[in-house]
Amino acid sequence: DESGEYRITSREGEPLARVLALGPGLREAALVIGGLALFLYAMHEISRTLRRACGGVFRQVLGKFASSRLLGASAGALLSVSMQSSTGATVMAVGMAAAGLLTLAQAMPVIIGASVGTIVTIHVIAFDLANYALFIAAFGVVVTLAARYRLWAYAGRTIFGFGLIFFGMGLMREGMAPLEHSRLAVGVIESVTGGAAQAFAVSAVFTALVQSSAATVALAMTVAGSGHMSASGLVGVMLGTHIGTTIAPFVSGIGVGRTGLRVAFASFLYKAVAAVVLLPLAGVLATAAERLHFDVTEPRGIANVFTLVTLAGALPFAPFSRLYAKAAEVLIRERRGDVSRKRLNPALTAEPYAAASAVMLEAADIAALLWESAASITPALFEFSSVELERLENRDEVVDAKHRAAIEFLREAAAGEITARETRKISAVLYILRDLEAMGDLISKDIVPIGYRRLNADKSFGMGDMASIRRFSGGLVSALGAIERGLRLAAVSGLPVADGDVSRRLAEFQERAAGVAGAVNEAQAAHFSALARGVPEAVAADSVFVDAVAAFRQLYSLASDIAGILLNPPETTGFFHPAEKRREPWAK
């Protein structure tokens, strides 16, 4: 009955073994702490596995349905269930908002839905399957080892994780059982959880430390089984879990820009308001639980209380989600010079699909810069001033910097285990980035030198040549506008681009680009005709014009390749650039 080291000897006194024994107090503590550690580890593994298996799909669902509050809340609930973590779902919403994939108003219903989605997790862990836990875990290992496909391997890992959850719950119950007869333990439990306020504070702190509301509720299930936790104290515990889950999103919101911080603050505000209103009503909720015959000494009854408190904290306050968003905007203001959306947030590299979406928005920004450059080509070539030429060079430096940062970011995102779906999206983004950067180089290294040659030689284009350049430049401007819009849509809703107008514009440009060789030949034929007639401008600007239309031909080809990726993304895991199949996407 006492802790210490015991020696086992033979009848002759010879030492046979040494045994380290734990007394009742230490043994129970080891069971509770060890069971909780197993539970937390299993929850983390299940969350990571399900995120790898389903995360990309649900991020795409969020992007498509977040515009509707009801659909956004439904998507948030599904995301929470798929990740087995409302905290993880909220952190994802913060990251997506910081990356520009969600607005603050769109993120709020997602967060509310994620909170409601935790109900499913709590009801799952309420099953008393401790006696079968190791069989469940063993079955999960068999499925994982025998799996021929990654999806089955994910299923096996998830089953193994649930086995560990039930085993950990069993250890905690076993450790808590003797405490029913300990006056000291009963006194501590009653002093901590006897009132709703004390239980709320302890629960909030514990949940913040372990970053899991499910772990707090699981521990409450084992403690409440002793019969010494009041119903109002249990309500306080449940309210505390909701506040505790806001800490991790706050931490993730720091350093990702004002938008991410606003989402984290709005999440805290929503749950804090609900707690302030409901905490004084803990007795009312406890009475309601009793009238509904929720047995607060049984895991299922505790799960039902959690459901009651969660719905009471969500349904009455969800309609005011826009007010929380507005309050966050007012209290967390933009600072002068602050970048509100730090898209390439290092935290997103753990989510390759979300990272690729964030980089796709960066690619859209690059396309916008190239649109400005394309619109400046005509004045840069026609005017007798170097101002526009210098702007084109400076803009390409920005394009190069964005390209380097995006490539490095995707390298980090693709460093770990990635799915076929993530591979396809990352490959598509990489090739788009390379083509955009190549377009920037063509403008700065081909078009700009042509402009300087014309400027230094004091040459002018003929009317026919000017019309041809305007026509090529106008088509490129239109294409880059459609590409920018397509990239922004694809970042949120995935590939292929589903918007009818953008798809039509991209398809029309592809048709025009397919005939660009003929258009270039016609322009050059008209130029050579003028040259043969001895038109002074054609003679003076002969080589300049020929080089300019050749550069436009390459620009059209690159833009057409990007349009092709946006309209017809690859369906296979291995994806190669349509124009250069032998080159790696990392290559410049």
Image (tube, rainbow, N blue to C red):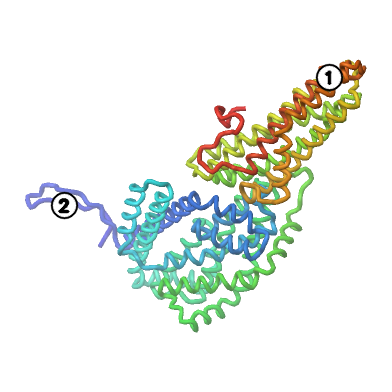
- Cα distance, mark 2 to mark 1? 106 Å
Q: Classify residue 272 as left or right of residue 155.
A: right
In the rendered image of this protein, does residue 362 appear above or below residue 134? Answer: above
List x then y, in percent, for residue 344: 64, 41
Q: Which comes before the other along the chain, label 2 or label 1? A: 2
Residue type, mark 2 in image: Ile
Q: Which residue is depicted at the point 36% across and 69% down? A: 179
Instruction: Give the image location of residue 43, x and y in percent.
Output: 45, 56
Instruction: Indicate the secondary structure of the residue bearing disc 2.
Output: strand
For residue 169, which quarter of the picture?
bottom left
Give the residue at mark 2: 8
Quarter of the image that includes the N terminus:
bottom left
Question: Looking at the rendering, which quadrant does residue 586 occupy?
Answer: top right
Which numbered disc covers residue 149?
A: none
Residue in the foreground of this view, choosing between 358 and 481? 481
Q: In this view, does 270 lie above or below 530?
A: below
Please state which of residues 286 and 6 is positioned toward the viewer in this rendering. Answer: 286
Q: Can residue 337 be seen in this view?
A: yes
The front one of 570 and 330 is 570
144 lies above or below 536: below
**x, y percent for residue 295:** 43, 78
The residue lying at 66 percent from left, 56 percent from top is: 263
Residue 397 appears in the picture as rendered: no
Identify the residue position indicated by label 1 in the image.
Answer: 528
Label 1 environment density (alpha carbons within 10 Å; few <14, some 14–19, many ≥20)? some
The residue drawn where x is 44% and y is 51% is 45
Residue sitting farthest toward the bottom: 291
Q: How many labels does the image show?
A: 2
Question: Label 1 is placed on what type of residue?
Answer: Phe
